[in-house]
Amino acid sequence: MEIAVLTKGVPDFREGQVSFDEDGHLERGKTPTVMNPNDKFALRAALQTKVRHGGNVTLCSMGPPGYDNILEEGMRDVYADDLVLVSDREFAAADTWATAITLTAALEHMETEPDVVFAGFKTADGETGHTGPQTCWGLDRPILTHVISLDIEPENEVVRAKRLVEGDVDEIETVEAPLPCVVVTDPEFEPTYRRAEHRLELKDLREQTKERAENYEDHLTMWNHEELNLDPDFVGLDGSPTIVSSVDPIPKSPSEREATMVTPDDEEGMEQVLEEMTPFAGGD
Amino acid sequence: MTDREHYEAVVVGAGPGGAAAAARLADHGVETLVLERGADAGAKNVSGGLIYAEQSAPYTVDDLFPDFREEASERPITDYKMDNIAGNRVKTYDLTPLHENDTLWCDAVLRRKMDSWMAERVHEKCRESGGGLLTDVRVNGLLRENGEIVGVTCDELDDIEADVVIAADGVNSELAREAGLMDWDDPEEWFQGVKAVVDVPDGFVQETFGVDEDEGVARLFSGDLFQDARGGGFMYTNQDTLSIGTVFHLDSIVEERAETHELLDALLTHPHLSNWLPEEYDEVEYSAKLVPDSKKVALKEPHRDRLLLVGDAAGQMQAQGPIIKGMNHAVTAGALAADAYVTARGRSGETAGQRYATLLDREGVMDKLRPKSYDWTSGISEHPAMANVMETVAKSPVGRAVLRTGAAESLVERAFNSPRLLSMLPDIKPAYVTVPTLIGEEQGVPVSGESTVETPTLEERIGDLSYNTDIGNPHIEVVDNSWAASGTAVTACPVSAEDFGGGCYRSETVGTNGSEERVVSLDTQPCVECGTCAVVADTEWEHPRGGKGVEYEQG
Ligand SMILES: Cc1cc2nc3c(=O)[nH]c(=O)nc-3n(C[C@H](O)[C@H](O)[C@H](O)COP(=O)(O)OP(=O)(O)OC[C@H]3O[C@@H](n4cnc5c(N)ncnc54)[C@H](O)[C@@H]3O)c2cc1C
Ligand code: SF4
């Protein structure tokens, strides 16, 4: 089974990592780039597929050459056989549409076209959730979204999945699709391994993962627009129909509350504090 | 199902018994799958623990794991003493001769380190023959076909078939029980062990005990410090920690309604112990587990169909007087079970199980586990009347006078050091309490000083343990919550107490029809899976699912 996983680098929005300027604009230069957190679930689904059915996992991303650390991170987290970085100045500033066109070309360029393409649900920066479905359209394949568990029957060329359908009441829907297809995992995705042989295989792969990540460059391939046979007019900024009209800065939380400083040595001050707090001590 | 998984051998449990069985099977080239419920091998296990390599044993742990002593153990034990305590008087006997009898070497171990180290070797070996070791998997039953055992069922995996199933799942073996080979009914058949691992500064062991890096000390304690509970205490030196614990006959814990953590505290805070404890008492782990008494439960035929029982699961845990030998026998039995399977496979006539029982007998293991001398004498020596006679004689002026003589000292020391006499040692109070106390009284010298040890409360002890709680899925259920049926668990459970509301078992009073009734309630969250309430209370008792429950760092 040939398996591909699409991933993307996003600013590390975790507390202590992310940096905003005074106007609330993200400072990209000061904020480290990491693998889109939701893509981990796609990688887990890909690994489950590899473990259960054998085959190759290719982790693929589009971005500047420095993005190889995103691929490395993915490889450290979950096993990957090959890494593909689609990188070219011509691809810069692409919107989700141009990205999807580029990724479609990359997937079609792979030695064996993947039977299943996995993508994570929404990126942490854009939050559009478009790239997966658009790539799917590009590949002309069925798509399964919000997938929380997955069973593939390669001999029958079908994929059976449980989808989480959020609404007033969350529902779990079981769906079936033919192979090849695109699967977008939900953050609730849970891999399951009910056979000992699969867990043993997983253990082996986990061992190998460490080694492979150490030498991730040996497994890395880079493709530019020429190798993918892409016309620069249809990719990157030029190929992006999306126009961002304006970006609203994140409003800062108001700090209106007044504070009076009291040092613990100041007896009078402390008494006053206690007095003021007393009414609340009963939990009122 | 057609594509059911099949392995030539499935080994349940990665303690010393399972590790030995799997290593030996893999050495024979048998495709072996090992299933361990802990998140890591050793995460569920507790021993004192001194592991012995016996001269007479067909397999020792370093036969199967050559670097064991360098990599997995703590310290060789080179000095072995027993302290008989009466109040603050102590008489010490040197038991090193007993300790060295039939011993190639003996090391102190901590189970998390030991078991996880062995598990790595086992996994590598088994992988080569097509199997391997998996953690986080709990076997929950026996797979049967037409009534015959053909494999195992698990919480986390689909059914697995095997040509041989080696259950090395320890005391409270669910498989032994399901196969009808063991029951958990009689407290007399078990001991309960409780232990604290105490941190000491670097170099402390060498200085305090006067030993080198590659030497260590074991001390045993008996006498009146444990009220009337039958059993004793131990202290073993690890690399930079001490293992201090108690082992009591479970029936005696039940009869005395003893709070087991208080018995441990009585030892820890005895002034005699302050000789070896640092100023600041720093307990890193509190743990507990049941221990089978091989004299009563070691199975002569530990097998059924394709199932072979090994180690504690088969009751193969020998209390040779004060010396506790469980790990070594589990190793030997595991290796013999593997050999038995390999010899018997593909042959008609003798089954692997029968072969295994024969090997246990022929290699002298059964004789150690169930000494014939004990079987002959216990009928008389454990008769209640006998206990009375011994108690009276020992306490009489005559008994005391005898103990005061100089000749008595060497006689007692010789008696303590006689493996044969110890194997006959009756399980009655005079042997555990009266005589050691009298020795302490008549021969002992007072210890000076007071203990500064402040032991943690149960709440603190529980708070320091790691749990991966299986919320909403308790592994123990109380069937009869009346005080008469299950009340004993409130005191006997090592993480519960009468006056403590944060433990597993709690005593409650409920009003029904105008009268008040005392009942127990259970919260399994703080459970350390020791197995005690499986025996002393009316419960439906299972182990938690794979990877859930308590996780020991030391063991
Ligand atoms: C306080 C104390 C002091 C002791 N002191 C000593 C001593 O000094 N020397 C000595 O030799 N012995 C001592 N023992 C006894 C010794 O610990 C045991 O005899 C020994 O551990 C038995 O080994 P085993 O392999 O049979 O079982 P265990 O070591 O108990 O191993 C059983 C394994 O099976 C796993 N398991 C159980 N059920 C399942 C399941 N359903 N599915 C999957 N896995 C499962 C468990 O997690 C565990 O890893 C002591 C015991 C105690 C409690
Ligand atoms: S609840 Fe039962 S098994 Fe758990 S610690 Fe208490 S006595 Fe032991």
Image: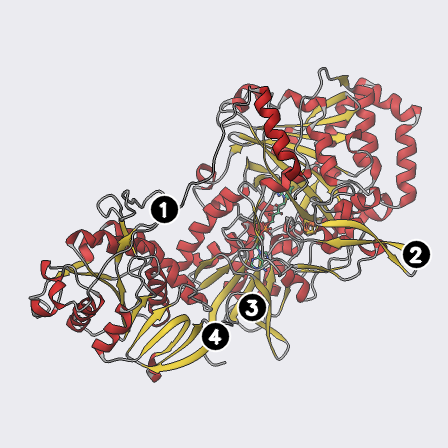
- x 73%, y 45%: residue: B501
Q: Which residue position holds label 4?
A: A172
Residues at marks 1 and 4 on the same chain: yes
Q: Which of marks 3 and 2 is nearer the N terminus?
A: 3
**Badge 2 element:** strand
Circle 4 residues within 10 Å: few <14, some 14–19, many ≥20: some
Residue in front for this viewpoint, B23 or A159:
A159
Q: Which of marks 1 and 4 is nearer the N terminus?
A: 4
Q: Which residue position holds label 1?
A: A252
**Cβ atoms under marks 4 and 3 closer than 8 Å:** no
Give the number of the mark in front: 4 or 3: 4
Give the number of the mark in front: 2 or 1: 1
| Residue found at the very far top of the displayed protein | B448
**Type of amino acid at the residue the image marks with label 3:** Val
Residue in front for this viewpoint, A207 or A216:
A216
**Type of amino acid at the residue the image marks with label 1:** Lys
